[in-house]
Image (cartoon, rainbow, N blue to C red):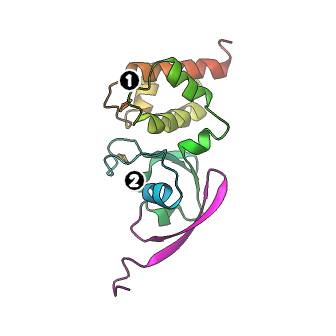
Amino acid sequence: MSAGGLHDLQTVALTVNGSERTVAVPAHRTLLDALRDEMGLTGSKTCCAEGECGACTVLLDGRAVNACLVLCAEADGHEVTTVEGLSERGLTDLQEEFLNAGAVQCGFCIPGQVVSAEYLLRGNPSPSEEQIREALSGNLCRCAGYQRIVRAVQATAARRRGDRG
Ligand code: FES
Ligand code: FES
């Protein structure tokens, strides 16, 4: 064991998608890596690993965060929801509207887009196009499917409001 303790394991207890989980991780392990590598939740994607792309977006105590910028230890005692947690009972209405809008191209950014959009819609059931674009501005899509992604979020908002059958 190293004298500096960099590789010493810390025990972290957190709630992930409604289940209590305990993991032993080095102090520098990110929440993203712990979710993917320790818990097998690979829906959250690793891309830039520096907070620029949003592919790793999860909800931490209900707030959208970049999991690559959060240490696993910082999530101790907190509640994490990943894209898997949002869709435990099958595709959500939001995910269905992403498909309906043809917003899914390579798909790499989509889990992060879905989590960010869900966070937006929970706080704002009737977002304007500008608000949708702002809410998703931290989620980059290399396939540049932004217009279709916006349409998918608008369609979900309308569906939740009961504007259409
Ligand atoms: S992988 Fe976290 S923001 Fe890019
Ligand atoms: S669908 Fe390919 S990066 Fe967004």
Give the structural element (helix, strand or loop) at label 2: helix
Q: Is residue 139 above or below residue 162?
A: below
Give the structural element (helix, strand or loop) at label 1: helix
Q: Amino acid at mark 1?
A: Tyr
Q: Does the magenta run of residues contain 11? A: yes
| Mark drawn on residue 68 | 2
Does the beta carbon of the residue at mark 2 sit less than 8 Å from ligand 1?
A: yes
Give whichever of 55, 59 is nearer the camera: 55
User: What crowding class fits label 2: few (fewer than 14 Cα within 10 Å), some (14-19), or many (20 or more)?
Assistant: many
- Residue at (50, 34) in percent of width and height: 114
Dividing the image into 4 quarters, which one contains the N terminus? bottom left
- Residue at (55, 22) in percent of width and height: 97
Q: Position of residue 137 (x, y in %)?
A: 37, 33
Residues in magenta?
Answer: 1-29
Work out whether mark 1 precedes mark 2 in sequence or the reverse, and give the earlier one. Answer: 2
Q: Amino acid at mark 2?
A: Cys
- Residue at (31, 31) in percent of width and height: 142
| Residue 127 visible to the viewer | no
Asked if the residues shown at circle 1 and circle 2 are in contact, with their CB atoms under 8 angstroms apart, the answer is no
| Mark drawn on residue 146 | 1
